[in-house]
Image: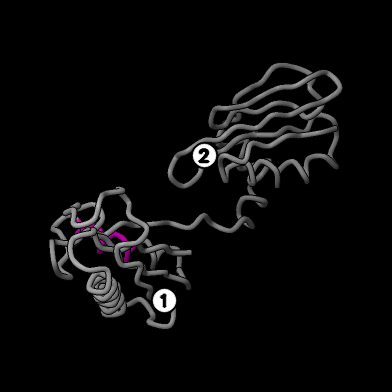
Amino acid sequence: MICKFSPSSPLILIAAAMLVSACTSPPRSYVVLLPDASGNVGQVSVQSPRGEQKITNANQAVLIDGSGPGFVVSPEQLKKDFGAALAASPRMPEQFLLYFESGGADLTADSEKLLVDLVERSRNRQSLDLSVVGHTDTQGSAEGNEALALQRAQSIAIRLSSMGIASTAISIESHGERNLLVPTPDETVEPRNRRVEVTQR
């Protein structure tokens, strides 16, 4: 039997992991599609001697042998059938975007609140790897923006450490005005580009 997986979503990896164990099971085994941590859903195409079946919705499933239409799997059934596999799967990284006022390392009011949520979530998942990457918009020189982005990343790292995150778990990087979230010409003020990206794993 051949199973094709769309590369457009990490959800397919979950389905693939389930499929590997399911292919050694009786013919009533099935493939189910789950949303990722952000609620996004990819798609899976399953081919069997009976033809091809595609699933595109969260918790939608098909039997591996192709016998019968697609169906929806309840949370209770998912836990029963795949609880151990899901518990053993690594959690998806979480990314937070913290935005800054112009020209410095002061967070916006909304990002101050988000920083508190970030720390709480990091504690809950016991993150051991936090990547802190500073960015700027294109106003000013490239050299100055490289330094400003580093200043922003360092300020967030210090804040995280003061809020209980181990400094050994934090890595810092500056991208300056490279890797813009919103592409702009040079010397353009763009609040969404004045940011620090924190990714926790």
Residue at image position (27%, 74%) is 143
The residue singled out by tag 2 in the image is 35
Residue at image position (73%, 34%) is 4
The residue singled out by tag 1 in the image is 171
Q: Position of residue 21 (x, y in %)?
A: 78, 45
Type of residue at label 1?
A: Ser
Q: Position of residue 150 (x, y in %)?
A: 29, 75
Q: Which residue in the rendered view is the most extreme toward the bottom?
A: 168
Q: Residue 49, relative to residue 59: is it above or below?
A: above
Q: Which residues are magenta?
A: 111-120
Q: Is residue 27 magenta?
A: no
Type of residue at label 2?
A: Pro
- Position of 131 with respect to 143 (left or right) is right
- Position of 143 with respect to 200 (left or right) is left
Residue density around tag 1, few if under 14, some if 14–19, many if 20 or more, within 10 Å: some
- Position of 18 with respect to 67 (left or right) is left
Q: Secondary structure at mark 1?
A: strand
Q: Residue 118, relative to residue 39: is it above or below?
A: below
